[in-house]
C-alpha cells in the first residue's frame, strides 16, 4: 500500500503537472502533445466529441495526427491531449503499440481494460453486464458463458456446419432471387440500387433466424425489425455524446415524435430478443450447441449485443467488400472466376478461394468496420513492443487504438512495406506478403481485434460475409455510381453512398439463382 500525504494528492499532482505541461509518459516512445484549440491550423475539428462534431468521428481522430507526417520521431504515430483537470487521452496509430496493448488487455491484475467511455450509449441500449461493456472478472465470466457457440470448433463441426450453411444458403439465395425479380420486372437490363439496406436485412435474417432460430416472418423482420434496430444503433452514438445525465430513452416521456418512435424501436428490439430466447427454449438454430446452464436472464443483454453488434459489423464488412469490388472490375472478375463453381461453402472450399480471401482481408485492412479500439490503464503500465520500444502509461489514461489511420498509413502499409500504396485497394498485396515470408503476426490489421478480447464472432462473421458477397458476385456484375469511395462512421464505418451500385445479371437465360448454391 502506498503512503499518500492527503486525499486527492494524486489528482492534485496530476493537475499541477498538466498545468506545467510535463509529459505524463516515460520511455523511448514519446508521444507528441496536441493543443485543444489551434486557431488557423486548418485542423478538421476539436480533438474530442461534442454535439457539433460527434457525427464525424474519423475527423476527430484525424485531428490528433494533424501535421504529424512532418515529424520523424515516435510522435509521428503517437499523440496525446492533456487538458488540465481532465483525464489524459493517448491516441496511437502505431501498429506495434496497438498490438502490445491488445495483447495486454484482459482480466489479469494490471492489464488494460476496454474503456467504457465511448460505449455508454451501447450499455444503455443493451445492459451493462455484457461481454462488450464489462471488464475484469465479470467480462471473463460473460466470455465463458456465451462465446462458445460462435467458436470455430462449434461452427465448423461437419454436421453442424452443413445444417447451418444449408439454411444460410437458402436465405441468401431467396434474397438474391428477390433482387433478380426486381431487376426483371423493371424491364431494364441494369438497376441502380443502394445495397446497404438489402445487406442489412439479409444479415439480420442470418443471425436472428438462421443462427438463433427465432421464429419471425421475413417481412416482419425486414419491414419492422431492420429499420427499428437500425435507428436504435444510430441513436447509440447520439446518446453517448448528448445524454450526460444518462437517462434511458425508454424512461423519457414521449415529448417529441422522435422520442416516441425511438421508444417503439426499443420495444421492437426487446421483442426480437424474446423471440431469440424462445428459440433457445426450443433448441432451435445453433442453440443446441450451447451447453451453458446460464438462465435466459443472464444471457439477455449479451443477446442484444450479438444482435445489434453482429448486424452492424457484418453489414459494414459486406458493404465495404461490395463497394471495393464495385470500383475494381478486374478484382470482381477474378473473384467471380474463383467462386463460380463453388457449390458448397465449406471452410475448405472457402480457404481454397485464395483471391477472394485476400479481397476480404484487404477490405478489413483498408476499411475496418470498428475504426478504433478503446482501452484504459487500470494502473501505471509499461508497454513493450515486439521491436523493443517501450512506453510507460500512467493510471486512468484513455487510450484510443486508431486502427483506421494505422491501416491507411504509408509507413506501415505502403509501397516500401507491402509493394503497393497504402490507400489503394490491392488484394494482391496479401499474396506478395505471404510470398515474401511475412508471417501473420507481422501484418495484423486488427479488423477483428487481437488478444484476449478478440472478436468471438469472427468465424461466424467471416462465413456470413463470404457467403453473401460470394453469392452476390456469382449472380451480378456491378459497378459503383460514384468513383469516390468515402466513409461515414457511427458505431461502425460504412460506405458514405450507402453502397450505391448499378447492377446487371450475369446471365439472362434460365434461372441464375439455380447456380447460387
Ligand atoms: C464480421 C464482422 C465483424 C467484425 C469486423 C467484428 C469486429 C470486432 C472487433 C474489432 C472486436 C474487438 C473490439 C476491441 O478489441 O475493443 C470485436 C469484439 C466483439 N465482437 Fe465482433 N466483429 C464482427 C462480427 C461479430 C459477430 C457476428 C458477433 C456475434 C455474433 C460479434 C460479437 C462481438 C463481441 C461480443 C465482442 C466483444 C468481445 C469481448 O470483449 O470479449 N462480432 N468485434
Image (cartoon, rainbow, N blue to C red):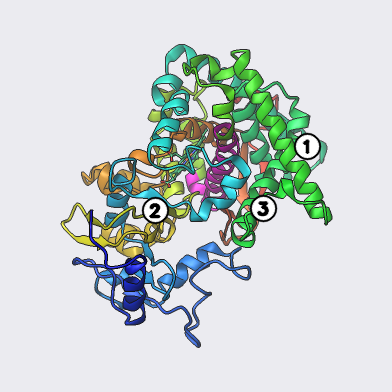
Q: Mark 3 points at which residue?
A: 247
**Residue at the image position 33 percent from the left and 71 percent from the top:** 14
Q: Between residues 144 and 77, which one lies in front from this camera angle? A: 144
**Which of the numbered marks, if any, corresponds to residue 223?**
1
Left or right: residue 380 versus residue 28 is: right
Tell me the crowding category of disc 3: few under 14, some 14 to 19, or many 20 or more residues within 10 angstroms, Cα based. few
Task: Point out the frontmost of discs 1 and 2.
Answer: 2
**Vertical order, 193 against 22 (above or below):** above
Answer yes or no: disc 2 within 8 Å of ligand 1.
yes
Residues rendered magenta in the picture: 302-331
Q: Looking at the rendering, which quadrant does residue 312 occupy? A: top right
Residue 308 higher or lower than 156, as above or below: below
Please indicate whether residue 431 sits to the left or right of residue 448 in the image.
left
Name which of mark 1 and mark 2 comes first in the sequence. 1
Please name the residue that numbered disc 2 is placed on: 375
- Residues at discs 1 and 2 in contact (Cβ within 8 Å): no
Q: Where is residue 81 in the image (x, y as percent from the top left)?
A: 40, 72
Q: Residue at x 54, y 63 (%)?
A: 57
Q: How far apart are marks 1 and 2 (CA)?
A: 37 Å
Amino acid at each position: 500500500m502506498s503512503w499518500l500525504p492527503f486525499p486527492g494528492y494524486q489528482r492534485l499532482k496530476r493537475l499541477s503537472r498538466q498545468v506545467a505541461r510535463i509529459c505524463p509518459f516515460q520511455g523511448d516512445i514519446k508521444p507528441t502533445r496536441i493543443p485543444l484549440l489551434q486557431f488557423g491550423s486548418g485542423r478538421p475539428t476539436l480533438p474530442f466529441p461534442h454535439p457539433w462534431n460527434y457525427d464525424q468521428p474519423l475527423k476527430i481522430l484525424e485531428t490528433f495526427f494533424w501535421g504529424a507526417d512532418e515529424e520523424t520521431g515516435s510522435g509521428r504515430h503517437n499523440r496525446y491531449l492533456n487538458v488540465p483537470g481532465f483525464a489524459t487521452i493517448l491516441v496511437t496509430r502505431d501498429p506495434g503499440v496497438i498490438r502490445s496493448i491488445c495483447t495486454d488487455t484482459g482480466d489479469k491484475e494490471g492489464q488494460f481494460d476496454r474503456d467504457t467511455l465511448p460505449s455508454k450509449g451501447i450499455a444503455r441500449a443493451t445492459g451493462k453486464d455484457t461481454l462488450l461493456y464489462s471488464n475484469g472478472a465479470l467480462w471473463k465470466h460473460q466470455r465463458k458463458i456465451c462465446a462458445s457457440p460462435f467458436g470455430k470448433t462449434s461452427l465448423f463441426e461437419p454436421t453442424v456446419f452443413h445444417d447451418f450453411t444449408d439454411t444460410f444458403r437458402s436465405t441468401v439465395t431467396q434474397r438474391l432471387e428477390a433482387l433478380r425479380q426486381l431487376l426483371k420486372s423493371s424491364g431494364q437490363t441494369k438497376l441502380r440500387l443502394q445495397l446497404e439496406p438489402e445487406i442489412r436485412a439479409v444479415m439480420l435474417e442470418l443471425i436472428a433466424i438462421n443462427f438463433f432460430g427465432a421464429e419471425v416472418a421475413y417481412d416482419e423482420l425486414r419491414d419492422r425489425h431492420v429499420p427499428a434496430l437500425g435507428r436504435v444503433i444510430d441513436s447509440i452514438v447520439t446518446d453517448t455524446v448528448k445524454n450526460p445525465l444518462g437517462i434511458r430513452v425508454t424512461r423519457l416521456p414521449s415529448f417529441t415524435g422522435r422520442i416516441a418512435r425511438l421508444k417503439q424501436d426499443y420495444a421492437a428490439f426487446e421483442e426480437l430478443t424474446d423471440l431469440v430466447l424462445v428459440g433457445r427454449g426450443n433448441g432451435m438454430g445453433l442453440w443446441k450447441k450451447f451447453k451453458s446452464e446460464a438462465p435466459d436472464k443472464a444471457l439477455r443483454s449479451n443477446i442484444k449485443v450479438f444482435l445489434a453488434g453482429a448486424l452492424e459489423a457484418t453489414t459494414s464488412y459486406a458493404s465495404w467488400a461490395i463497394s471495393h469490388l464495385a470500383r475494381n472490375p478486374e478484382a470482381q472478375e477474378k473473384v467471380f472466376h474463383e467462386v463460380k463453381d463453388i457449390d458448397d461453402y465449406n471452410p475448405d472450399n472457402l480457404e481454397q478461394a485464395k483471391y477472394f480471401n485476400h479481397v476480404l482481408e484487404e477490405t478489413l485492412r483498408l476499411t475496418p468496420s470498428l475504426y478504433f479500439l478503446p482501452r484504459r490503464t487500470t494502473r501505471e503500465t509499461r508497454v513493450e513492443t515486439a521491436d523493443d520500444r517501450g512506453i510507460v502509461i500512467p493510471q486512468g489514461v484513455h487510450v484510443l487504438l486508431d486502427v483506421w489511420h494505422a491501416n491507411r498509413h504509408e509507413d506501415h502499409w505502403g509501397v516500401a512495406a507491402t509493394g503497393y500504396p497504402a490507400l489503394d485497394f490491392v488484394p494482391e498485396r496479401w499474396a506478395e506478403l505471404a510470398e515474401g515470408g511475412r508471417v501473420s503476426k507481422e501484418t495484423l490489421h486488427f479488423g477483428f481485434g487481437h488478444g484476449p478480447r478478440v472478436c468471438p464472432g469472427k468465424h461466424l462473421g467471416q462465413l456470413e460475409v463470404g457467403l453473401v458477397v460470394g453469392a452476390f458476385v456469382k449472380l451480378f456484375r456491378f459497378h459503383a455510381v460514384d468513383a469516390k469511395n468515402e466513409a461515414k462512421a457511427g458505431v461502425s464505418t460504412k460506405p458514405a453512398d450507402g453502397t450505391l451500385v448499378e447492377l446487371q445479371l450475369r446471365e439472362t437465360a434460365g434461372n441464375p439463382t439455380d447456380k447460387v448454391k
